[in-house]
Amino acid sequence: MPINYTMDKLLIVANWKSNKTVSESIEFLQKLKMVFLSLPLSNKELVILPQFIALPACAAFAKENNLPISLGVQTVSSFSDGAYTGEVSARQAGEFASYVLLNHSERKKYFMENDESLKEKFSQVVRNNLTPIVCVQDENSFIPNGATCVVYEPPSAISTFSTGIPESREEVEKVFEKIKNNSSAKLLYGGSVSEKNVNEYVGIPFLAGFLVGGASLDPETFINLIKAC
Ligand code: PGA
């Protein structure tokens, strides 16, 4: 289902990348379940992006336990269902997921994704009524028409990439302003966001949330991050 955004809710997107087995994913959710009633969630929406194979189990667990999380996937096929060995289509992902992350720097670096694949995947995602979360690497990156959610994540800020230095608040503000000139999408920041620095970004004009990689893997660290913003 496409998501209706509540403008004042911060979207916190946990990108687990290629980490966690199915049972480790459920262990994480079990830990979240133990504390979620005490978390400041009235102003936040939590989106977890597990591995494809963990997605059905995470969806079942969230439903059985009334966990207030949404689920998404980290990429989808450029194609519809069919003879595309190894691919997961947007329609198939949509059985369990509401969101799809697109154009992440690791997809570009390791899987040769580019603006063309972004266009194809974006159209699959929208056609299947899922919400795309489009990563852009700088203010000049291509943003598909109709994008409603964009993450500014400079590769230099990703914790596992070269420098892993988080972008400064001032720089994020500047880039957001430029993106806003050409797009009405809500804007997220990603890149080495942690419980320690998340609050530095809160309050940036147009900031609607965060994409969190490394700091989303350990339940305690992630919970602290939620509490800190
Ligand atoms: P990071 O990753 O928070 O570990 O820098 C973010 C991402 O790449 O999505």
Image (tube, helix red, strand yellow):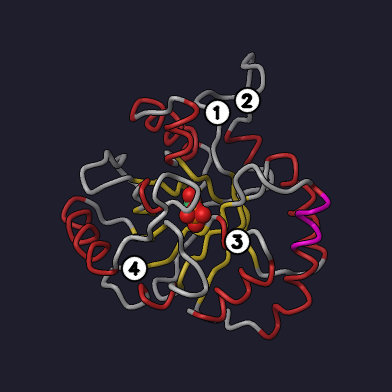
> What residue sits right under mark 3 in the picture?
216
Q: How many numbered discs?
A: 4
As measured in the structure, the alpha-carbon distance from the residue carrying label 4 to the one carrying label 2 is 33 Å
Mark 2 vs 3, N-terminal side? 2
Element under disc 3 = helix
What type is the residue that disc 1 sits on? Ser
As measured in the structure, the alpha-carbon distance from the residue carrying label 1 to the one carrying label 3 is 25 Å
Query: Could you say which quadrant of the image residue 59 lies in?
Result: bottom right
Element under disc 1 = loop
Element under disc 2 = loop
- Identified at 16% across, 55% down, the residue is 181
Mark 4 vs 2, N-terminal side? 2
Dots 2 and 3: beta carbons under 8 Å? no
Which of the two residues, 224 or 45, is positioned nearer the viewer here?
224
**Mark 2, mark 3: which one is toward the viewer?**
3
Task: Please tell me whether residue 72 belongs to the stretch shown in magenta.
Answer: no
